[in-house]
Image (cartoon, rainbow, N blue to C red):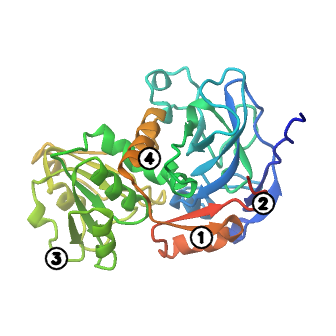
Amino acid sequence: MSSPAPLEFKGYAMTDPSAWSDLKIVSFQPKTFGPEDVELAITHCGVCGSDLHILNQSWGESRSGPLVVGHEIVGKVTRVGEKVKGLRPGDRVGVGGGVTSCRECRACNEGYENYCPQLVIAMNGVHSDGVPTQGGFSTGIRAHERFVFPIPDKIESRHAASMMCGGITVFHPLRANGCGPGKKVGVIGIGGVGHYAVLFAKAMGAEVYAFTRGTAKADDARRMGADHVIDTTTEEFWKPHNFSLDIIISTVDHFGPGMSLPSILSMLYIQGKYITVGLPPVDEPLPALHPFALAKNASSVGSSFLGTKEDALAMLELAAAKDVVPWVEELPMSQARVALEGLKAGNARYRYVLRQDISPVA
């Protein structure tokens, strides 16, 4: 029996930063395959706001040369290193924002590999062998086994894809901060990431408060599971909820008129947590904050980044058990421009997912 043909690595890449959404098919070199690595042929990749930030360089200048974005990846394993355990060719797996870490530092040893100072990002980064990382708008990717997550049979690939970043970005802080029955959780911003916060907070048993600008998404938020929907354009919208919420997950990357950090923090109960996962352009920091705003309820302000493998496995298990189904629009990967520009225009309802069409996987 002949061996399968080696995976050919091609992707939709930005080749001209002045035309950031006009992606061209290019061939690229993958990282050197290691004994703990997993190679997968990509079937689907979600489209995330981080892709926009990197392509339009609002987080700083992107790497020179062809750049393939995408970090919400699902595919089939084509190859495993000799030291890989629990994965084999043919398995359906996901890869998120990270592809490897040092595996030696305190963070890695304590199971927080997503915070490793030497974390290698799936796109716009560089592997230890000097090869640039290229993301999931492509035919394949290689990652360390610690950053590869088996997908339960019950979850469709197009649904699992956007969980790899949009989902884990909110599941990680919800889990870390005790979301569950008896807790009241606020979600600010009902977009691609925010809709996941509503879905997962509800699945975890919390009472969910969805804060959204205007009423256009109110019915959607309720269908996702929100128990309460609050229009943030209403004057002093926060006052009826003062001193009541245990956790607030903010997914917005800027504060609109009438919103201030002290007013949002006033809604937290004693030792409540405000967790911001929205990452704005580098020249747009959080609003100024006086310590009095924290002292009144012993609240705290924090953030988080991606999630651990343990988080990812728990998230997927919960999604399968509780039938958590994201709201996605699936497009062929050749229409990445439509998805990117639709996301930038605010048209996503609520996550675009691309189906790989350069070399379709059976």
Residue 168 got which mark?
4
Q: Identify the secondary structure beneath mark 2.
A: loop
Q: Residues within 10 Å of mark 2 (few under 14, many from 20)?
A: some
| Residue at image point 71% right, 23% down | 35
Q: Residues within 10 Å of mark 3 (few under 14, many from 20)?
A: few
- Residue 129 location (% of width, % of height): 75, 32
Tell me the mark number nearer the camera, choosing from 1 and 2: 2
- Sequence order check, earlier mark of 1 and 2: 1
Lateral position of residue 178 relative to residue 75, left or right? left
Question: What is the C-alpha distance between the residues marked 1 and 3?
Answer: 34 Å
| Residue at image point 51% right, 43% down | 152
- Residue 53 location (% of width, % of height): 55, 60
Residue under numbered circle 3: 235
Residue under numbered circle 1: 339
Residue 358 got which mark?
2
Q: Amino acid at mark 2?
A: Ile
Question: What is the C-alpha distance between the residues marked 2 and 4?
Answer: 27 Å
Question: What is the C-alpha distance between the residues marked 1 and 4?
Answer: 21 Å
Q: Are marks 1 and 2 in contact (CB under 8 Å)?
A: no
Tell me the mark number nearer the camera, choosing from 4 and 3: 4
Q: Amino acid at mark 1?
A: Ala
